[in-house]
Image (cartoon, rainbow, N blue to C red):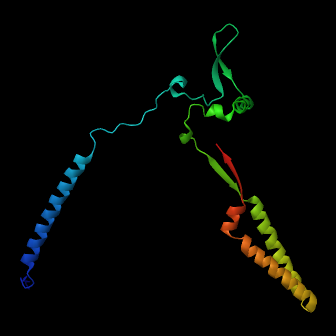
């Protein structure tokens, strides 16, 4: 039995379109590769470490060792403990550190401390819990229940005012450093 393929569905046309499509795709890929090569810099240099002397950088050495002179005037490496380095740094006034820096280049840092506000809110929440517990315990006594409900309402009102971002910002302790 032999089988015959008919051109009933236009297989010739489909094959022709597919070959045209593959040639177009190949051309596009070549053009994209060429454009990428044009965009590449000729040579990419790796970053290198470079020695800069303290005289050129104008900064104080950050390590615990520094150059000094012995009794005879010969160069000597001196080791500072962390205590000595901190003492020497603290002896310098703040203005000395910023000497030569224009006022508009100086940065002021403001630090907000919200610990007091958070502690206050925490105490109010604890007081609210205690009042709720006392209210459950005094279910039979109407006079005590009314007193506890008024106290609870006051605490809840105070808590709703103080437990907001705006209140926390307004009542935080701010310190400014230069």
Instruction: Give x and y (percent) for residue 22.
Output: 15, 65
> Where residue 5 sits in the image (x, y, percent)?
8, 82
Q: Residue at x 61, y 46 (%)?
A: 108
Q: Which residue does the image show at 13% across and 71% down from the upper left?
A: 18
Residue 135 x/y as whole percent = 87, 85
Marks counted in the figure total 0
Compare residues 1 and 34 and report the one nearer the observer.
34
Q: Residue furthest top?
A: 72
Residue drawn 15% across the image and 59% down it: 27
- The N terminus appears in which quarter of the rendering? bottom left
Q: Nearer the viewer, residue 39 or 15?
A: 39
Q: Which of 119 and 31 is in front in this view?
A: 119
Q: Would you place residue 115 above or below residue 89 in this image?
A: below
Q: In this view, does 142 lie to the left or right of 10?
A: right
Residue 55, placed above or below residue 154: above
Asked if residue 98 lies left or right of residue 34, the reply is right
Horizontal side, residue 120 vs residue 6: left or right = right
Q: In this view, does 106 lie above or below 131?
A: above
Image quarter of residue 119: bottom right
Q: Where is residue 72 in the image (x, y as percent from the top left)?
A: 68, 7
Q: Could you tell me which residue is drawn at 72 percent across and 30 percent down?
A: 91
Using the rendered view, name the quadrant where residue 11 is placed. bottom left
Outermost residue on the front side: it is: 103
Q: From this view, report whether residue 22 is shown above or below residue 155.
A: above
Q: Quadrant of residue 148?
A: bottom right
The residue lying toward the viewer, choosing from 169 and 25, is 169
User: In the figure, is residue 120 to the left or right of 169?
Assistant: right
Quarter in which the C terminus is drawn: top right
């Amino acid at each position: 039995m032999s089988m015959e393929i008919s051109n009933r569905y236009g297989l010739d046309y489909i094959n022709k379109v597919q070959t045209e499509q593959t040639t177009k795709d190949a051309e596009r890929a070549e053009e994209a590769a060429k454009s990428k090569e044009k965009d590449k810099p000729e040579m990419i240099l790796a970053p290198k470490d470079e020695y800069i002397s303290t005289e050129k950088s104008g900064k104080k050495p950050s390590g615990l060792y520094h150059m000094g002179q012995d009794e005879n005037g010969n160069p000597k490496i001196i080791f500072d403990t962390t205590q000595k380095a901190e003492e020497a740094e603290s002896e310098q006034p703040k203005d000395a550190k910023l000497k030569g820096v224009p006022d508009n280049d100086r940065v002021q840092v403001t630090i907000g401390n919200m610990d007091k506000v958070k502690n206050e809110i925490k105490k109010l929440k604890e007081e609210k819990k205690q009042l709720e517990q006392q209210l459950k315990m005094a279910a039979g006594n109407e006079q005590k229940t009314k007193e506890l409900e008024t106290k609870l309402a006051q605490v809840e009102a105070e808590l709703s005012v103080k437990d907001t971002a705006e209140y926390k910002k307004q009542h935080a302790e701010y310190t400014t450093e230069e």
